[in-house]
Image (cartoon, rainbow, N blue to C red):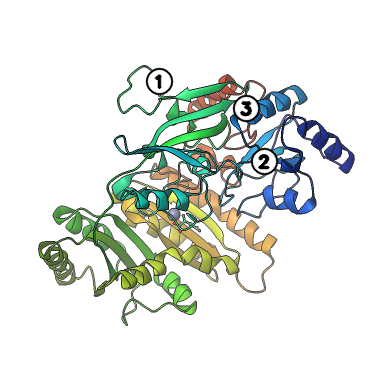
Amino acid sequence: MSNVASDFITEPNDERRQQIAKQLGEFIDPDKVRIDEESLLGHGCDWTKLYKVNPLAIVFPKTVEQVQQLVKFARAEKIALVPSGGRTGLSGGAVASQGEIVVSFDYMNQMSDFNPVDRTVVCQPGVITQQLQDFAEEQCLYYPVDFASAGSSQIAGNIATNAGGIKVIKYGMTRDWVAGMKVVTGTGELIDLNKNLLKNNTGYDLRHLFAGSEGTLGLIVEATMRLTQPPKDLSVLVLGVPEMAAIMEILRAFQNRMPLTAFEFFSESGCKLTTAHGLQRPFETETPFYVLIEYENQSEQDAETAMEVFEYCMEQGWVVDGVISQSESQAENLWALRENLGECCAPFTPYKNDISVTTSQVPGFLEDIDAVVSQAYPDFTLVWWGHIGDGNLHLNILKPEGMEKEEFFSKCQAVNKQVFEIVERYQGSISAEHGVGLVKRDYIQYTRSDADVALMQGIKKVFDPDNIMNPGKIFQS
Ligand SMILES: O=C(O)CC[C@@H](O)C(=O)O
Ligand SMILES: [Zn+2]
């Protein structure tokens, strides 16, 4: 796979590392500068594991001032910086393969200044998503952005990738929960964006440029996150769906009658994987697809409405079997059928895709892509799942046993062009929620126009004139 194209490509050796560590140790605690192999390899990559990992050093700043000094140092020395959060990304956004300094926020992980009226809490960049969720719960509130890697992903990384997950249909993406943020730009300047205001129409909202910026504009050093009222008495329904086309009818039928907190799906190939890992099938009947619906079940009326819609879907032939959770633990088990899919695919070295279209177009889009990939490689197993209520599909192609990883990936890449042409035809996105990083960078033109990319490159130059902020990610810079 190709690696980062940067102005400052270096192939660090031990001597250079020692020298840089000494210089960094002048303004960052020396024990928070690491150049040992384990740290370099561990902190120089994310979950993609596709790229050469070769950082110059790993630093763990503890204060905003240290971050500013670091940026000024990097600027003077012409060394690129790669921000590192929980490194759970799937697009290579946190990969350091060309002698960059990795900036880890593991030691800036405190929360402060909870405001119960504004319902906000100030987070240092390294606060773990789960830590924020737990804190909110202790205050009888709720942080709603949720996904399988919530136990490791960090808030600044979530903002930098505008993380989505399983509740977007009701609560939106990470950007919707950022009340304010402090950022150190590529010049070392500290800027304070939006100051937590709800209403602030004073020109461009720069906060939103940082959501999805993947570290290319600056380092997020603080974020004030909003919390909300927790949902009550969540129930989960899993339905067996014989035809993809029916899924949107099911969505419409439910949404016409009741608000949903999640509308997810997975394929039978996915169900086989999770059940092979010890989970129970939702019901006996096997169907090509399963829908998982979550809603607030606060009264008998809610339960009756859900049952009525379910029966209506059965009468229409859109659904052939189904189950409704009767307890919290049953709801969790049903969720596991969907949430454990990424983990269950991992041993098969999957080739991943994270794509989206407008929700109503999902069935045709999925069928077209499935046909192209299955025709090219009839022996490959395709596992589909995703946040179908948001139009977001995850396609994992499993590597056949015995096939070399390189051969498998190059075969998958060969079919990429056709897949992305379909995405372009549907005016969809080549990356719905996992970001662009390195993995999707060379395909960005299927979703963003040349004019878009040129404007993004121009914006980067304003925030980062020396191109030291995660260069080569999202687009060539
Ligand atoms: O592993 C994947 O392909 C998707 C991961 C995550 O976004 C999910 O929704 O499970
Ligand atoms: Zn997802």
Label 2 crowd bin: few (<14), some (14–19), many (20+), radius 10 Å: many
Q: In this figure, which residue is indicated by the disc labeled 2?
A: 60
Q: Is residue 461 above or below residue 152?
A: above
Q: Pick the quarter of the image with the C terminus.
A: top right
Q: In this figure, which residue is indicated by the disc labeled 1?
A: 204
Residue 391 is at least partly visible in this image: no
Q: Is residue 325 left or right of residue 82?
A: left
Distance of mark 2 from mark 1, alpha carbons?
Answer: 32 Å
Numbered circle sitting on residue 65: 3
Q: Residue at x 56, y 52 (%)?
A: 88
Residue type at mark 3: give it.
Answer: Glu
Which of pointers 2 and 1 indicates the residue nearer the eye? 2
**Do labels 3 and 1 touch, CB within 8 Å?**
no
Instruction: Looking at the image, tell me whether mark 2 or mark 1 is earlier in sequence order.
Output: 2
Q: Residue at x 69, y 23 (%)?
A: 72
User: Residue 449, percent across and down?
Assistant: 48, 31
**Which picture quadrant has residue 197?**
top left
User: Residue 448, percent across and down?
Assistant: 47, 35
Distance of mark 3 from mark 1, alpha carbons?
Answer: 26 Å
User: Residue 86, percent across and down?
Assistant: 57, 49
Q: Is residue 225 above or below residue 217?
A: below
